[in-house]
């Protein structure tokens, strides 16, 4: 497994509550949910960039 780097995240408390609830629904930790969502956003961005080049 790749090494993970820790960093501080400042987040609106209401957004954090929503993320915590969403993570619980999907049986993930809050950190895992944030990481999952970021990975999905990066994949979508890469796909969008490929479409623009075509």
Image (cartoon, helix red, strand yellow):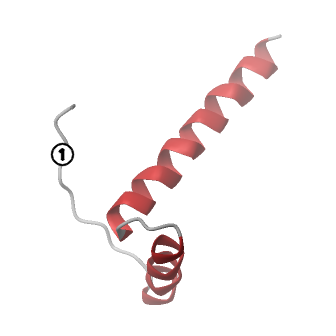
Considering only vertical position in the picture, is 50 above or below 40? above
Most extreme residue toward the front is 27
**Looking at the image, which is closer to me, 25 or 42?**
25
Q: Position of residue 43 (x, y in %)?
A: 59, 34
Residue depicted at 62% across the width and 27% down the height = 46
Vertical side of 12 occupied by 30: above or below: above
| 54 relative position to 50: left or right | right
Residue positioned 17% across, 53% down in the render: 6
Q: Residue at 52% of width from left, 54% of height from top?
A: 37
Q: Is residue 50 left or right of residue 40?
A: right
Screen quadrant of the N terminus: top left
Number of disc labels: 1
Examine the rendered structure and indicate whether residue 20 appears above or below residue 48: below
Residue farthest toward the top in the current orientation of the protein: 54
**x, y (%) of residue 41?**
58, 45
Residue at mark 1: 5
Res. 48 image quadrant: top right
In this view, the residue in front, 36 or 6, is 36
Q: Secondary structure at mark 1?
A: loop
**Between 33 and 43, which is closer to the camera in this rendering?**
33
């Amino acid at each position: 497994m790749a090494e993970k780097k820790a960093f501080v995240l400042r987040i609106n408390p209401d957004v954090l509550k929503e993320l915590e609830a969403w993570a619980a629904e999907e049986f993930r930790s809050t950190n895992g949910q944030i990481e999952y969502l970021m990975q999905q956003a990066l994949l979508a961005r890469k796909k969008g960039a490929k479409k623009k080049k075509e």
